[in-house]
Each structure stands twice: as C-alpha cells, then as structure tokens.
Amino acid sequence: MAKVNIPNPTPEQIEQWKKEYATKDKCIHRITSASGKVGYVHDPDRKTLSLAMTRIAQNNIIGGVEAILDNCWLGGDESLKTNDKSFMGLANQIEQLIQAETVTLEKL
C-alpha cells in the first residue's frame, strides 16, 4: 500500500511518525528550504540504501537520491521532490540521512 502524503502534518502526526519510525539509531527529519517549503523524512533502512547504491553504481546519482526520498518521505510539500531547484538542494543534504558507525578491521 502506497504512503499517502500528509502536506501539513499536525504535531500529533509528527509524534505518530516518531513512534512508528524513530528508534535508538533512526530519526525523523524536517527539511526546510530557503523558500520556506517543509517536508519530513525518516532515515533509510538497508533495503532502501541497497536500492539507492545500486542506482548510484549505475551512474544514476539522481536515481539514488530519488530512491531514498521515495522510500523515506513521510509528508510535507512534495514540490521539494518535484521542483528541480528544491530537489537539487535536498540532494545535497541526503548524505546526512546515511549515517554509519566507525568500525575498525584488524588482521589476526
């Protein structure tokens, strides 16, 4: 079932998203453009990251960003995803959604 966009979520809806998507390691994020557009996304899961990385490996960087936005979008002004200027501004912030823990590798 496709997600329904909630263009103007209430504080109660945002709290519901937090209950549904936020965990110890995952967050809900508010996106605000310079023109005042607001959107909400959650951190991507491994399946979404796999899809995005596959597209990026095929030299489709925009497709990778779209994969993350399509799968992580919760609500707000969808023109953030459809307006080219807004999309490119948002694309520059996507890496902040992809968080990784520093690990070390030791040969034994």
Image (spheres, helix red, strand yellow):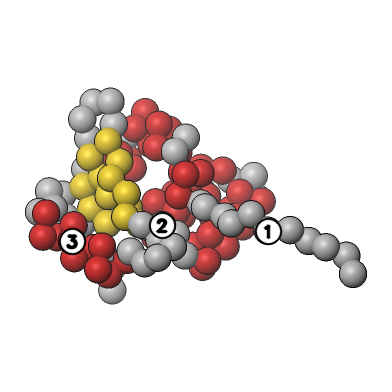
| SS under mark 2 | loop
Q: Vertical placement of 82 versus 6: above or below?
A: above
Q: Nearer the viewer, residue 6 or 22?
A: 22
Neighbourhood count class around disc 2 (C-alpha, 10 Å): few under 14, some 14–19, many 20 upward: many
Total marks placed: 3
CA gap between label 2 and label 3 equals: 16 Å
Q: Nearer the viewer, residue 1 or 75?
A: 75
Give the residue type that dot 1 points to.
Val
The residue tagged 1 is 103
Using the rendered image of the protein, determine whether residue 51 is visible from the camera's viewpoint: no
| SS under mark 1 | loop
N-terminal of the pair, mark 3 or mark 1, is 3
Image coordinates of residue 61 in percent, x first then y, are 56, 43
The residue tagged 3 is 15
Q: Name the residue rendered at 26%, 62% in the picture.
A: 18
Image quadrant occupied by the C terminus: bottom right
CA gap between label 3 and label 1 equals: 32 Å
Q: Name the residue rendered at 20%, 30% in the picture.
A: 36
The outermost residue toward the bottom is 1
Q: Name the residue rendered at 36%, 67% in the picture.
A: 23
Mark 2 vs mark 3, foreground winner is 3
Q: Is residue 58 left or right of residue 10?
A: right
> Residue 43 has which mark?
2
Q: Vertical placement of 42 versus 21: above or below?
A: above
